[in-house]
């Protein structure tokens, strides 16, 4: 199961409802999500990360990444080694 949280005070992206309906997500606190082994950030139209998705297992992380690609989103860290802004992947509209 993936944990997710919306970051306080940041507007969700217009496509957020597609993420919620296509991924099996369990709502948690920001602290709880940040404790997960792998983190996915999602940017809104302003370029700000508004949602975090945390995965305990690499398999769950890869399934989430695949679903986000299927939604037409792109991962800006796809060709980058390591993390950025604390995330292992950061998705936004292409």
Image: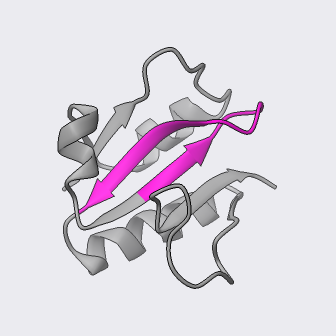
Prevalent SS, magenta region: strand
- Decide if residue 48 is on the left or right side of residue 82: right
Quick check: is 44 in the magenta stretch? yes
The quadrant in which residue 78 appears is bottom right
Task: Give the residue at the far top of this rendering.
Answer: 9
The quadrant in which residue 55 appears is bottom left
Looking at the rendering, the stretch of residues picked out in magenta corresponds to 40-55
Percent position (x, y) of residue 86? Answer: 45, 58
Percent position (x, y) of residue 66? Answer: 51, 70
Percent position (x, y) of residue 3? Answer: 25, 46
For the point 51% across and 50% down, the residue is: 41
For the point 24% across and 67% down, the residue is: 37
The quadrant in which residue 35 appears is bottom left
For the point 64% across and 71% down, the residue is: 77
Location of the N terminus (image quadrant): bottom left
Quick check: is 32 in the magenta stretch? no
Location of the C terminus (image quadrant): bottom right
Task: Give the residue at the far right of this rendering.
Answer: 94
Q: How many marks?
A: 0
Question: Along the line of sight, which residue is nearer the eye, 90 or 68?
Answer: 90
Asked if 64 appears above or below 15 in the picture, the reply is below
For the point 56% across and 64% down, the residue is: 84
Question: Along the line of sight, which residue is nearer the eye, 42 or 69?
Answer: 42
Percent position (x, y) of residue 39? Answer: 38, 59
- Decide if residue 55 is on the left or right side of residue 84: left
Indicate how the structure is coloured in the image. one colour
């Amino acid at each position: 199961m993936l944990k997710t949280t919306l970051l306080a005070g940041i507007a969700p992206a217009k496509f957020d409802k597609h993420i919620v309906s296509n991924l099996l997500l369990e709502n948690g606190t920001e602290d709880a999500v940040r404790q997960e082994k792998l983190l996915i950030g999602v940017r809104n139209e302003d370029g700000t990360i508004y949602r975090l998705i945390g995965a305990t297992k690499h398999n769950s992380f890869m399934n989430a990444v695949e679903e986000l690609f299927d939604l037409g989103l792109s991962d800006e860290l796809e060709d980058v080694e390591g993390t950025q802004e604390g995330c292992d992947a950061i998705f936004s509209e292409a």
